[in-house]
Amino acid sequence: MLNHIVLMGRLTRDPELRHTGSGIPVASFSLAVDRDFANKETGERTCDFIDVVAWRATAEFVSKYFAKGRMAVVSGRLQMRDWNDKDGNKRRSAEVIADNVYFGDSKRDGAAQGGSYGGYANNGSGNSTGSGYNNYGSGNSGYAGGGYSAPAPAPASDFAMLEDDDSQLPF
């Protein structure tokens, strides 16, 4: 069986970080995710509001670097939760349990907080590994990088045009 979901959207509120009785961090937030199609009658695109829950290092990462309005990419699984409302009626809600949360924008895009490209967090039960860009560790490792700000590439000014003569090609 496969239960995997990937979402990209903007946070509708600041993440709420709490701790369980045993001290495990848990963060909850909501993403506004645009639908890929417009309403036939109005021509407007609608938006879905999806609840997300992150645990452990992922929760701390989201709480530290994300805020309302920030674009996030969430990878995780869909979970259905049954609960009783205040009148005793049985209710059911869906939420995404985040395994990984990435930045969907950069600080320059008007975000209030956080790092830049490459932010990654995993709530795996292994040891935290790596501290930089593209160091994701193994499947069971938990990487809680604070986001890596990649240096801007230098403009390419020392390139020369090659003639149509194939003898100048390096391969």
Image (tube, grey):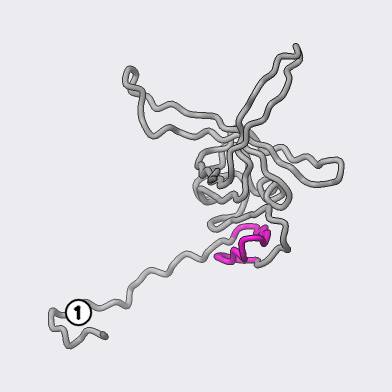
Asked if residue 63 lies in the magenta stretch, the reply is no
Q: Which residue is mark 1?
A: 162
Residue lying at the far front of the rendered structure: 1
Up-down relation of residue 86 to residue 146 (above or below):
above
Along the line of sight, the residue nearer the viewer: 48 or 157: 48
Q: Which residues are magenta?
A: 131-147
x and y, in percent, of residue 112 in the image: 60, 44
x and y, in percent, of residue 81 in the image: 67, 30
Residue in view at x 77 percent, y 45 percent: 25
x and y, in percent, of residue 51 in the image: 61, 33
Task: Tell me how many marks there are.
Answer: 1
Q: Is residue 57 left or right of residue 133?
A: right
Asked if residue 136 lies in the magenta stretch, the reply is yes
Up-down relation of residue 72 to residue 146 (above or below):
above
Along the line of sight, the residue nearer the viewer: 46 or 3: 3
x and y, in percent, of residue 126 in the image: 72, 61
